[in-house]
Image (cartoon, rainbow, N blue to C red):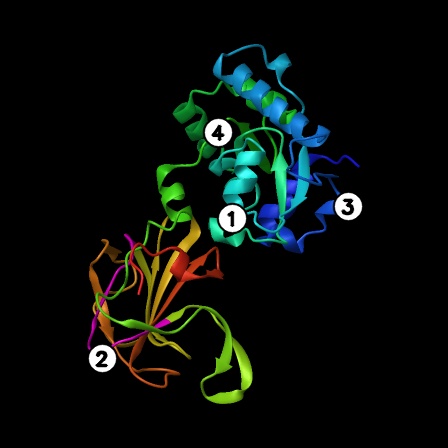
Amino acid sequence: MKINYILIILILISSALSPLQLRAEEQVEKLASLAYQDNSELKSIRDDIKQTIYTVKSRRSEKNLPELKFYTYKVKENENFWVVMSKCSLDMDTLMSVNNLTSPFQVVPGTTLFIPNMRGVIVPGNNIKSVYTVLAAEKIDIRYVQTVNKSETLDKKYIFIPCGKISTIEKSLFLGTAFFSPIKFGRKTSGFGTRKDPFNGKRMEFHKGIDLGCPSGTKVHAARRGEVVFSGYEEGYGNLVIVEHEFGYRSYYGHLSRKFVRAGDPVKPGQILALSGNTGRSTGPHLHFEIRKNGRALNPMTFLKKGF
């Protein structure tokens, strides 16, 4: 069953849900396998991608572009982000952008992914500047974008840019090479995800970050450049500093004993923000560290340059 692709993209981005949580199989065609033999869907995807690249890069007539389509694929055992990308002849930018992924580690067996028949990226239509930024960076003629999106004015909520690329910073964030360790010495005492409540062992809770054991007074550094958007006391976190970064990312530093920055302060990577402590809902001296994107908690261990 075919559907206007804009509806699919709207669901993907506005919901901020993983594809696994979407009822995609009712909306687009299915790709059953990544095997090359006797796989007409996969062959069609790869052929369309090749045709799109040839048309856009050689500046051929936009009439040569295939119609934009989306398929769904359920990742199988021994497959991951990189396997799917390679088998479908996609690139990292496309698979990441279309599926609203923040890390390749999100793609595991059982994950349902959207597979387009073109390489490219999705850009919010209400930010036309970002559309033209991608076009200028990759030297893409706007007529290809108008054709793919079936709109001369690009008056759409989301725009697919054929052969578009994400920025170097976005790639760095996605590959987990954009954040430094917030402390120089320490050990992980509690991980990200569901765990036993440290104050009530009979109850489970979701831990939105990681805990790094360290003595009170340990220097806490900014994991990435950004701007302080909160510096104060927050229930549970105790003394807390929140730094906002590019593309909706924020880093949280909790249970601090002392803070050296205020809301509105710009910070550089490695800059000392505070000293660790034991304030708030804490069972002992440590640093609670979180990374969120658009309000959604992500596993910090997939983003840090230096492990613990």
**Can residue 220 be found in the magenta stretch?**
yes
Tell me which label, 2 or 4, sits earlier in the chain. Answer: 4
**Kind of element beneath mark 1:** loop
Amino acid at the residue labelled 4: Gly
Marks 4/3: CA–CA distance? 28 Å
Which numbered disc flags the more N-terminal residue, 4 or 3?
3
Q: Does residue 102 appear anywhere in the picture?
A: no
The 10 Å Cα crowd at callout 3, few under 14, some 14 to 19, many 20 or more, is: few
Q: Are marks 2 and 3 in contact (CB under 8 Å)?
A: no
Q: Quadrant of the N terminus?
A: top right
189 left or right of 262?
A: right
Mark 3: amino acid? Glu
Identify residue for label 3.
Answer: 26
Tell me if mark 4 has few (under 14), some (14-19) or many (20+) residues whose alpha carbon lies within 10 angstroms of its own: many
Q: Which percent across, then down, holds residue 185?
A: 22, 69
| Dots 1, 2 in contact, CB < 8 A | no
Please tell me whether mark 4 sits on a helix, a strand or a loop. loop
Q: Tell me, for residue 164, which label it has, or none.
A: 4
